[in-house]
Structure formats: structure tokens, C-alpha cells
Amino acid sequence: MSKKIYTPLFALSVLSAHLLFAEDKDNVEFSRPVMSMSQEGTHIVKGGVYIKHDGGLDNLWVLPTSGNIDFQAKRDERLGLEVMVAATYFSASNPNAFPQNYVRNISVSMPRLDASYIYGDLTHPLFRVDVGIFNYKYNENARNLGEYMFRTWAYPGFIQTGNAFGYVGNSSATVTGLKISQSLGMFSHEFLASLETEMTPIYDLNLTYMAKFNYRNILKVGGGVQLARALSNYDPPEMTVHYFELNGKWYPFDDKTGGLVGDDYYTQLQLGIFEKLNSTGLSSSDSTSLSTQCNCAPQGSKHPVSTADSIRLTGEFAQATQALAAIKSVQNMSPGSRPKMHDITSQAIKPVMYFSFDPKPLMGSNLFGPKDLIVYGEAAILGTKNYPVYYKDIWQRIPMMLGFNVPTFKVLDVLSVEAEYYGSRLLPAYKSPGSPAYTSVPVPFLSGLPYYPSDWDKDNLKWSIYAERTLVRGVTLSAQAASDHSRSWDWFSFGKTNWEMYTTPSQWYWAMKLGVKI
């Protein structure tokens, strides 16, 4: 399937290049190549305890050096081609003891291979088509958080900010596919057919529609919807998880691969409950009994529980034990006598809405900079459909971001403060490509840790502060401090680490970046 999807995309890009240069070369206009270079320095103040258990990544420096060169050409002002080649010289953030994580490495990429064509009158085009690899950003004010449409994944729902090497100014997505855009005065809209290139299975097809209404640059309201993984590139049994109903209750199950997804969930849940119950309020005999059931040793509770909580948790422990027994009974049945199985897949409907309000045109003052005083926000639903056990509450799949550009009276180009609330009670992690299961298996990754849902309310809040100043033409200094959804690079997974680096608001980093463009 990947060749069926990817080959036509590549062929279209090659065809555009051929049409651009094959005939009438005198009508081809080449723009002067634009070269950019940046040096970023990031200091991880506190974080990374889950991706590196021996002390975390506290007080670690990340110092990527990046550069790119951008080539553009046009023919008859309609057909265009943009090609960018980029490289980053970096060292990994050392979550694992691999030699490559302690030395400098180089990554070379092509973040732009964009062929475009304008239909209709050049001053008021009917629409524009882009095909290939291109940058996409719809929330122009978002500096770090937000941009959920192409930086989130559903079932399980997680969010990406930054990239694997640097974190400052990475507030957009690189999209591979087709985009058709049209502007009709105050209203504009776009359709995108894009290929999944971040999470396996890669080359799954996403279909997205985005629209925006702009009232005199004072109020901008936009939104869209994505049919995520509408067409799967690779759909073996391992990519589908099942659930069934027994005696009026629902349980997860996987009867095709031998993977015990339900066993894993309820076993880790038992461990999490036992960890809370194992306190001075739990009798020695009860502790021994429960530890035998979950095959775990007393650890000592960090938060001793009340009598009422002890009764509640003991009931939850019994329910988890009952669930394990139900799943085991169905596993022992012959396939023909098992209850009807329902599917959970990674396919999802993802709506997004965003806005910005700029009061300056109403004030008639020249004191403020162009970005000052803008209030903006965004929200998304990472999968509109509820599923039993894992995804019962849609409110736990809605990230919401609010930002404000603090007025600096032209001292800075922009100073933004952003906050996010995301009430997911799942671990902010996914299975790494090196693990036996695929990364997009639509169940939470529990990482072998004791799990209790409300424990993960601790990562509901994220924050970010971003500042930027143009020093001289072509030279920009920017800075960022944040507790966000950043991940580091690791050679074990040959890519981003599967754990977020910051899981409480008190875990954070600061970074500065000097950029030069000529």
C-alpha cells in the first residue's frame, strides 16, 4: 500500500519539476537561494526521570547547530518548485547508555520538496495546489503549544512539541502530501491529503479540511476536522485491539496476536492500587493477601489513605481481579464460543478550533508592536468516539491552549505566554519502534509501571514563555522557557524517545537560539 500511495506523490513532484524546466527555459525565474543557520542552547533544568531512571536528565545541556539552504524557482508565475536541504549537528540527550548518545552526530534532511501551481487569475487565484513535502501552520500566533491538528495522535492521545534536536521556534508541522487552498476575501479554506510520516505504520492516509474567517485582522476564527488514518497503509492483526461484553461489563482483549493487552492493563492497575493501599492503614494480613493476588511486594505508600479510600481502593482491586478472571476465561474458550468482539483501531475523527483577537486596530495607537496584546487559543478532540475501559471520557481527550502576547512597546518582536490543560489520565508515552508492538497500537503504553489513572493528573498543565527580537536585518535572537511535550533523541529507538521529558509543571527547561538568514 505504501508504494501505491507514495509513488504517485513522488511522480507528481518529478512531473512538476519536468514541466518547470523542460521547455522554454527563458520563462523560468530562479530566486536567490536563502541560507539560514542557527545555534541553539537548551538547559534541561529538571525532567526526564521516566526516560532515564537513574536520576533523570536534570542539568543536561543540548546544543544543536543547524543550517539549511532553500532554492525556489517559478515558471510563468504559476508553476513553482521549492527545495530545501537542511542539516543538524547534535548530540542526543543521553536517556540510554549507548555510545552514540554521548558524541556529536549529524542529521541531513529535506524538509521542503514542494511543487505548486496557481489556477485562475494571478491577482485573485481560484485556488493553489501544493504537492510534496511542505511546511504547514494554521495558528499563526502559537509559538510552542497548540497546532494540534498535525502534532497529535489519537488512541492513545498524545501531543508533540519541538522536534528531536531543538525546541525554540518549532511551532509548525512538516506535511507530506497534497494541499488545495482557496481564499475568498475574509474566508479561506484548505483541503489536505497527507501521509503519516511520524508514527508507524507510516504512509497511513489522513484527510483534513481547514477553514478560517478573518474579520479585518481583529478577530480570526478557524477550525477543521481530520479523518486520521482514513486509509491504512499496513493493517495486520497487531494493529487492531478488541473488546467484548460479558455479564454486562466490557473488557479489552486481543485474540489474534497473543498479546495480552487486557492482562497488562489490569495487572498494572492492580499494582497501582496496591501501592496506594500498602500503607499504615492496611493490616498486615490484608497487605499479604493483596500482594499475593497481584504478585507484588509491599513498597510502602507515599500517600497513606483514609478508611473510606481504603474501602474504595479495595473494591477497585477486586474489580481488577474480576476483570483478569473474565479475560482469562474468554482466552480459554474456543474461538467459536467467545463473546462477540468489537474493534479499537487508530482511525479517528479529530476536530480542531482556534481563534485570535487583536484589539490594536480598535485603539488607533502606535505605542504597541504588531504582535502586542493578541489573545489566542486552540482546542482539539483527539478522537470523537468513546471506547470502553481506555477511552470512556471524551473530556480526557481534549487539549486546550490559551496564549497572550504581552505588550513590550516594540522592545521585542513578540513576548508570548501560553498555558495548556490536557486532562488525559494516560501515561504521556507510546511503545517505541524497538518494542515488539507497533507504535500506533490503540491502547495506552504502561511501561511496566504501577498505574493508577488519577496519578496522571500531575501532567495536565503545561506552560511556555517565548521571546523574540530582531537584532539587525537577518539576525534574530529568541528564547524559550517551558514545561511542554518535548521529547529527546535516542539511538535505541532511532528517533524521538517514547516518553515526554516533562511530566509535571515543575519540570522544565530554558533555551536560547541565535539565527542568521542571508
Image (cartoon, rainbow, N blue to C red):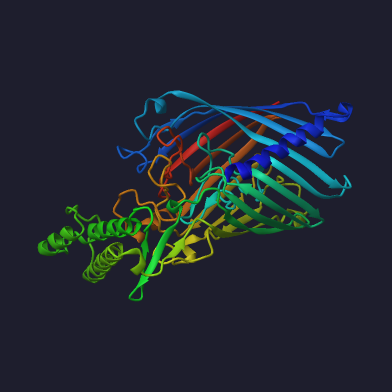
Residue 75 horizontal/vertical position (percent)? 84, 34
Residue shown at 81%/38% (left/top)?
79
The residue sitting at the bottom extreme is: 248
Rendering quarter of residue 465: top right
On the question of residue 19 being in view, the answer is yes
Q: Would residue 70 appear left or right of 256 to someone viewing this image?
A: right
Residue shown at 45%/52% (left/top)?
239
Q: Is residue 502 above or below residue 493?
A: below
Q: Nearer the viewer, residue 141 or 341?
A: 341
Residue 163 horizontal/vertical position (percent)? 53, 39
Q: Nearer the viewer, residue 435 or 161?
A: 435
The residue sitting at the left extreme is: 285
Q: Would residue 204 appear left or right of 358 to someone viewing this image?
A: left
Q: Would residue 439 appear left or right of 416 to someone viewing this image?
A: left
Q: Is residue 267 above or below residue 487?
A: below
Residue shown at 40%/50% (left/top)?
504
Q: Nearer the viewer, residue 184 or 220?
A: 184
On the question of residue 338 being in view, the answer is no
Residue 171 horizontal/vertical position (percent)? 59, 44
Residue 498 horizontal/vertical position (percent)? 42, 43
Q: Quadrant of the C terminus?
A: top right
Rendering quarter of residue 432: top left
Counting every numbered tag in the picture gives 0
